Image (spheres, rainbow, N blue to C red):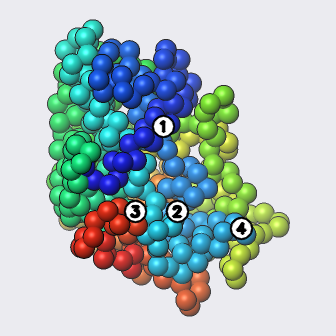
């Protein structure tokens, strides 16, 4: 087993949190030993629902996924006067493998992956499930596993990751390269799609309100295909993007922002035992380049950020812009229809179908941005710039998209440097604890820049 699976005990605390707006018997702390040694319908269902909370973990914390990747992508600042690493490590670099910054986005996803493995094994053996219900558990679980593994590899990139997460405790699984990790994510998503196709009309377990419209297997399959399209784009498989989108929930007939917002979300609440959305942290500020770089009258800017009278500052950086997108109970998108349209525009651009790509860009520009339509005679470089621009403003501060896009599309130099000593971190290093357990591990020599 890899060193990371020693952190499997985190699964207990992850599963102990009641899911947002879910009324699930026995969800509070389903015993892991019971799930492993004596799986029942009840503890498998409870743990399956618990995976939602585990997948949500550290998404919207002050030092979580949206914030850290937003800082790396020059979408945001965190002017926390008590911790200079929000600037000194994330912007001035390099990311440190032993810190809660550079060492992030590893233990949590792997804890959830380990729990998911137990859920799948339990679904195979627990009494009381129909064949369709077992298929539903597996299809859902494999999709969540793919999302967890995706979070690890989009942050660690060429440093690689572990894909064998169910080895015995005394067996260390290898760290494999990026291509192998993405291949495993694709395998999980495609196997999940097969499971979901045979899962009947409903799941045996409840889902949170963030899955509204996607809580039945056939609809959840559309969400699975949407994630598959994102993964295909990340690997440069543009025919695969178009194939996956054709089976997703993409809707290009929408005429409202609400239609673009249809999708799956991480939900938060102020209820007992749940967590609120930490993106309302008073230390979080929007990067000034958001306004400076915007096209005139782009409604996405006024909808997502606002100027305040008393700005914030830290370490010679300043901003008078705050984000509008979140409240303490506001959801965070997993994936939305607006992203699907932009994924198709990217795939069409990369397939040299420029008029079709422009049509999708225009749908987003006019509906979401309130901007005039682009000319159908744009050149390939102009279309490329519009893909980057519209992804930047449509997906602003939702999940690190700008940083990920800049790296995968060779545009890291587009990210501004606020100070001469600042750098552009490209990836997270393998965490120190993992490296300590692997003397001589080559992946541990990969730096963040």
To which residue does mark 4 refer? 82
- In what element is the residue under mark 1? helix
- In what element is the residue under mark 2? loop
To which residue does mark 1 refer? 14
- Comparing labels 1 and 3, the label whose residue is closer to the camera: 3
* Residue at the image point whose x is 61% and y is 60% from the top: 301
Residue 128: x, y in percent? 27, 8
Which of the marked residues, 2 or 4, is nearer the chain's N terminus?
4
Residue 47's quadrant in the figure?
A: top left
Task: Give the Cα separation between the discs numbered 2 and 4.
Answer: 14 Å
* Residue at the image point whose x is 66% and y is 29% from the top: 271
- In what element is the residue under mark 3? helix
**Is residue 117 at all visible to an observer of this figure?**
yes
To which residue does mark 3 refer? 433
To which residue does mark 2 refer? 100
Q: Which mark is residue 204?
A: none
Task: Give the Cα separation between the discs numbered 3 and 4.
Answer: 25 Å
* 341 shown above or below 72: above
Given the current orientation, which residue lies at the most extreme bottom position? 420
> Mark 2 Cα within 10 Å, few/some/many (few <14, many 20+)?
some
Residue 418's quadrant in the figure?
A: bottom right
Which of the marked residues, 1 or 3, is nearer the chain's N terminus?
1
> Mark 1 Cα within 10 Å, few/some/many (few <14, many 20+)?
many
Task: Give the Cα separation between the discs numbered 4 and 1.
Answer: 27 Å
């Amino acid at each position: 087993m890899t060193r990371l699976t020693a952190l499997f005990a985190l699964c207990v605390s992850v599963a102990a949190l009641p899911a947002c707006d879910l009324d699930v018997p026995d969800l509070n702390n389903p015993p892991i030993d019971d799930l492993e040694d004596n799986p029942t319908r009840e503890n498998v269902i409870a743990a399956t629902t618990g995976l939602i909370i585990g997948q949500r973990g550290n998404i919207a914390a002050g030092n979580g996924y949206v914030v850290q990747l937003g800082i790396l992508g020059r979408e945001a600042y965190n002017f926390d006067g008590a911790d200079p690493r929000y600037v000194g490590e994330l912007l001035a670099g390099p990311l440190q493998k032993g810190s809660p910054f550079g060492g992030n986005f590893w233990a949590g996803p792997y804890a959830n992956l380990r729990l998911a493995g137990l859920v799948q094994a339990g679904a195979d053996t627990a009494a009381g499930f129909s064949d369709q219900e077992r298929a539903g558990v597996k299809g859902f679980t494999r999709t969540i596993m793919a999302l967890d593994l995706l979070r690890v590899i989009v942050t660690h990139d060429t440093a690689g990751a572990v894909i064998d997460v169910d080895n015995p405790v005394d067996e260390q699984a290898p760290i494999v390269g990026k291509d192998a990790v993405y291949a495993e994510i694709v395998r999980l998503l495609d196997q999940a799609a097969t499971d979901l196709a045979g899962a009947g009309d409903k799941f045996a377990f409840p889902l949170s309100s963030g899955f509204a419209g996607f809580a039945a297997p056939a609809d959840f399959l559309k969400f699975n295909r949407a994630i598959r399209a994102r993964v295909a784009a990340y690997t440069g498989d543009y025919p695969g993007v178009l194939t996956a989108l054709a089976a997703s929930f993409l809707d290009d007939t929408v005429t409202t922002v609400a239609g673009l917002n249809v999708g799956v979300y991480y939900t938060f609440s102020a209820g007992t035992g749940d967590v609120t959305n930490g993106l309302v942290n008073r230390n979080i500020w929007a990067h000034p380049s958001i306004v400076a770089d915007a096209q005139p009258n782009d409604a996405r800017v006024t909808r997502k950020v606002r100027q305040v009278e008393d700005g914030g500052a830290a370490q010679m950086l300043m901003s008078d812009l705050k984000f509008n997108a979140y409240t303490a109970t506001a959801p965070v998108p997993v994936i939305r229809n607006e992203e699907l349209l932009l994924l198709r525009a990217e795939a069409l651009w990369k397939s040299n179908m420029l008029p079709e790509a422009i049509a999708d860009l225009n749908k987003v520009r006019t509906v979401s941005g309130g901007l005039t339509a682009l000319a159908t005679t744009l050149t390939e470089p102009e279309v490329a710039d519009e893909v980057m621009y519209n992804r930047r403003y449509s997906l602003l501060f939702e999940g690190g998209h700008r940083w990920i896009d800049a790296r995968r599309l060779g545009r890291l130099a587009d990210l501004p440097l606020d100070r001469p000593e600042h750098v552009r971190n490209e990836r997270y290093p393998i965490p120190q604890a993992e490296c300590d357990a692997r003397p001589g591990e080559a992946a541990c020599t990969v730096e963040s820049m």
